[in-house]
Amino acid sequence: MRPLLGLLLVFVGCTFALYLLSTRLPRGRTLGSGEEPGGRSLWFPSDLAELRELSEILREYRKEHQAYVLLLFCSAYLYKQGFAIPGSSFLNILAGALFGPWLGLLLCCVLTSVGATCCYLLSSIFGKQLVVSYFPDKVSLLQRKVEENRNSLFFFLLFLRLFPMTPNWFLNLSAPILNIPIVQFFFSVLLGKKLAGSDPVQFYLCADRLHPVNSDLSGCSFLLGNGLQAFGHCLGGLSSWNPH
């Protein structure tokens, strides 16, 4: 009960901090200027239309407050990764639109690694009993696989990122239970992100359309992963996209 309460307090504290960041915005031509009724705060995009709208707002706001937009993006990304919240694909595309292909790619790789490590630490401190209680079979299976590959653990972890036998969020949560060293864990996520892109469901982008497709990462993960931010940048910050 105490670990669950501690985890809940950390989650509430981080949520409140992110809420303050997204509502106490420095004045700008777009945000905080009274254009939005009631001082509407920023939000996590849940579909392509919201992603396009958020990109347009942040690209305009970034002209005056570049450092603050970077802080907001990093905080939101770490929040999602640290608490294993789905939706990083949208943030990957947003990174390319806001920061360009190369900086966007670098940011997503680093933030994914740091966020996954935060998830690792939260699970180590608060969540071990919860993970084992709710997912005993999955933990047992992973434990066997890790022990079988203990002599080449880093490459096995990298393999799991490229060809996941279990979702990445669960691997992040269960890693401390499996006695995976945090350094190997961090660099396997960093390199795996570089090679494999983000989530198994990726987006095929063309000149002015965005089509969701199920992508087999085994063949084209490198191109999709590295191109995700680049396409977002090249399409003019999503402002001219026509989603179908």
Image: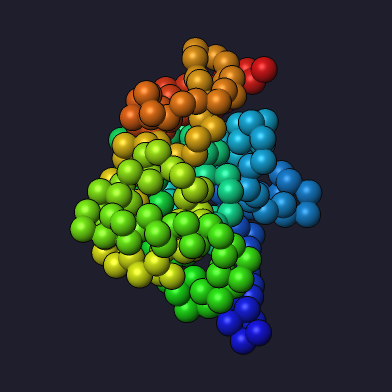
Which of 228 and 134 lies nearest the eye of the viewer? Answer: 134
Q: Position of residue 166 (x, y in %)?
A: 49, 48
Look at 58% across and 82% down and name the residue there.
3
**Is residue 108 visible to us here?**
yes
Residue 45 drawn above or below residue 69: above
Colouring used for the render: rainbow
Residue 50 versus residue 228: which sits nearer the camera? 228
List the single residue furthest toward the left.
151
Residue 25: image quadrant is: bottom right
Q: Residue furthest bottom?
A: 2
Which residue lies at the image location 37% right of the left edge and 24% below the top edge?
220
Q: How many marks?
A: 0
Task: Provide residue 91's location: percent of width, then percent of height.
Answer: 51, 42
Viewed as shown, does residue 65 lie left or right of 213?
left
Q: Is residue 187 left or right of residue 230?
A: left
Q: Residue furthest top?
A: 207
Which quadrant of the figure contains the N terminus?
bottom right
Q: Position of residue 228 (x, y in %)?
A: 43, 30
Residue extending furthest toward the right: 37
Relative to residue 34, is residue 108 drawn left or right?
A: left
* As drawn, 157 above or below 143: above
Residue 6 at x, y = what percent? 59, 82
Determine the residue positioned at 49% across, 39% down.
199
The quadrant the C terminus occupies is top right
Q: From the viewer's side, name the closer residue of 198 and 214.
A: 214
Is residue 110 in view from this perspective? no
